[in-house]
Image (cartoon, helix red, strand yellow):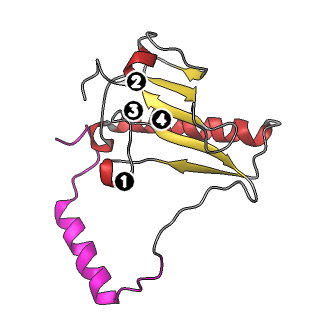
Amino acid sequence: MTSDDCVFCGIVERRLDASVVHESANVLAIMDIDPVTPGHVLVLPRAHLPELADLDDDLAAEMFAVARSVAAALRRSPLRSEGVNLFYADGEAAFQEVFHSHLHVFPRFADDGFTIGARWGSNPSHAELDANAATLRAELRPPGPAEA
C-alpha cells in the first residue's frame, strides 16, 4: 500500500473526512468509524509509517502521550468508560487492517461485547522462557531512531 492508497493518509491530507479529537504537527487522533465501543479513538502519525518499527522514539512517545490523554478524557467524560484498552496491531498476522501505524484507544465497560480470543496458559518451562529471552536479547537494538 502506498500513501496514495492509504485511508489514514487521505484523512491526514484532508482528502477524506474524519472527526478529529486531537492534532499536532506529528500526530492526529480521530474517532474510529467502526468503534468497538462509543468513544473509540485512533491515534496515528501524520507520516505514512506502516509498521511499529518505522516510528522513531519521539513519535512513538508522542503517540502514547496522546493515547494517555485521550484515555483520561474518556474516563472524565460522560461516555461509558469503566476502563480503557490500548491496542496496536503490527502486521497482518496481528490483525492490522490499515497499514499505517495507529494506536486504538477504546473505553471498556462490563458486558461491552469486546473479547480477546487468545490461548492463554501454555505454561512454558523456565528453560524455554530463558531461551526465548536470550534469543530476543541477541536481536535487541538500543532505543533510538526507527529500526531498518
Front residue of this view, candidates 6 and 138 = 6
Instruction: Tell me which label, 3 or 1, sits earlier in the chain.
Output: 3
Indicate the position of residue 126 as horizontal and vertical percent values.
Answer: 34, 88
Which numbered mark, 4 or 1, is in the foreground of this view?
A: 1
- Determine which residue is flagged by label 1: 94
Instruction: Tell me which label, 4 or 1, sits earlier in the chain.
Output: 4
Which numbered mark, 4 or 2, is in the foreground of this view?
A: 2
Q: Secondary structure at mark 4?
A: helix
Q: Secondary structure at mark 3?
A: helix
- Determine which residue is flagged by label 3: 59
- Eyeballing the image, is 64 above or below 85? above
- Determine which residue is flagged by label 4: 63
Q: Quadrant of residue 130?
A: bottom left
Between the residue at mark 3 and the residue at mark 4, the CA separation in whole angstroms equals 6 Å
The amino acid type found where label 2 is placed reads Val
Residue 62's label in the rendered image is none
Front residue of this view, candidates 117 and 135 = 117
Between the residue at mark 2 and the residue at mark 3, the CA separation in whole angstroms equals 20 Å
Q: Which residues are magenta?
A: 120-148
Q: Quadrant of the C terminus?
A: top left
Left or right, 15 with reference to 142: right
- Determine which residue is flagged by label 2: 7
